[in-house]
Amino acid sequence: MASIFKRSKKKNTPYLIQYKDCSGKRITVKGFTDKGLTEQLAGKLESETRLRSMGLIDPMQDRLAVQKQVLIAVHVSKFEESRGKSTNKYIQLMLGRIRRIIAGGEFKTLAEIDGEAVQSYLRKLQKAEDLGHRTYNHYVQAFDTFCNWCVTTKRLSSNPVLGLERLNTAVDVRHPRRALSAEELTRLVASARQSNKRIQGFSGEQRARIYLISYMTGLRKKEIASLTPLCFALVRAPPTVTVEAACSKHRRKDVLPLHPELVVALRQWVAGMSPGQKLFPDLDRKKTWLMVRKDLERVGIAYETEDGFADFHAAGRHTHITELLRNGASLPEAKELARHSDVNMTMRYTHIGLKDQAKALGNLPAQALYPPTTPTPTSDPSTQAALQMRSIPGVPEEQSVSLTGKSDTTQKRHNPCWGKGYVNDQRQLAVTDNMEAAGIEPASRDVSMEASTRVVNSLIVDALTPVDRVRCDQPGA
């Protein structure tokens, strides 16, 4: 039974309510200055306690209700602590975007977060600061990450910005990149080696080695900066390089094969170094794009063209993936070497130009452009035999052929089946190379009957004897 009391007899002092929750713990809450309203609140609290003890109210709802009333700045601080190293620039950038959305949307508590309000603010920010589609999506992703963390830690029951629209980055590219050709990359490495100037603290030879490792392994800047002699297994079959999870972009340990020519160079580069010594100290903090730009300009290669920028990421990783596909690697193989989770991401790193397309098109079989050669009648024995079955029958000397299709003969025609063996009495079906036109009856038909299709006159005349030719030349023949 809840009790109502006052600790002070001063006027307008609110009443206090004391009751036991479902676990038996005594709870004291503030009521109202009016005793009647305080009694109604006490009755409601007792009723809810009874329902919770019966299992009809989920205690988690109470926790969510309490968390929603906590200032949102407190939750952001807890979120920052959960991210680990707060000095990471990516974490700081994400936290800055989260706090900017909270301030722009004027959200005081988690209960006030609304997806439409977030989208409305980001649209205004995009217009005011001319944000690119990719930057806009980064804002959405940062706030979505924070809300998902609130759901995971039981601060929210659901993500209020779930499904918030992302913009199409393909139609608004602010910093397009282009891959170098093999010839351009060779000149870039040579330019660095021939340079006597130090750029971003690295000598020409060091820059050349950085470019080569980036191109031949596809590693990112931060991953290259973490390399030590212990990362290489040069005597293994095949030789490999290992990138620890702490330095990998997707926070996973990666083991990649090495190019045989790079293995030979690495043996010289790591000779005399201590196992834990970094090959390129503080590379991740350097302006690598400036290194590439100056080394390219030294040999007359444009840093920026209509295809995009040839910064460090483009000259190394983009060129690595593009050259893999240019030289026969399959798309799944390139995806695994690039350590992408989706093949669509690999395609974004692939720069196939018009020359590459023309080269691929040139490998297309073109036999269909040329019609097949028609074989001659004597080129194929089987064809020749089939044609002979349609040839004009041989004409013996005692037999004449008339134009009416009937024959005058002084000798009975031999039955082709006479002898029942086709061996004792074989006859050649045609004695000349002249052939019957299409539609002529087979040579074995009875020539005494009117033909359904007549033979071309020239072919007939060629088959007659000299005496019969004279008959045909006479009038009325």
Image (cartoon, grey):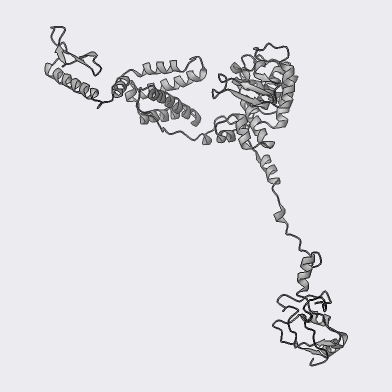
- Tell me: residue 4, above or below residue 315: above
- Left or right of residue 76, residue 463 in this image: right
Residue 18 pos. (x, y %): 19, 13
Quarter of the image where the N terminus is located: top left
Residue 263 visible? The answer is yes
- Left or right of residue 275, residue 45 in this image: left
Residue 193 pos. (x, y %): 74, 20
> Quadrant of residue 98 in the image?
top left
Residue ranking furthest to the front:
420
Q: Which residue is painted at 44% across and 25% down in the image?
A: 145
Q: Nearer the viewer, residue 366 or 335?
A: 335
> Quadrant of residue 311 in the image?
top right
- Tell me: residue 239, above or below residue 20: below
Q: Nearer the viewer, residue 92 or 465?
A: 465
Q: Nearer the viewer, residue 32 or 334?
A: 334
Q: Which residue is painted at 55% across and 23% down in the image?
A: 252
Residue ranking furthest to the right:
466
- Left or right of residue 142, residue 44 in this image: left
Residue 46 pos. (x, y %): 18, 20
Residue 307 visible? The answer is no
Q: Nearer the viewer, residue 237 or 60?
A: 237
Quarter of the image where the C terminus is located: bottom right
Q: Which residue is painted at 41% across and 20% down in the image?
A: 99
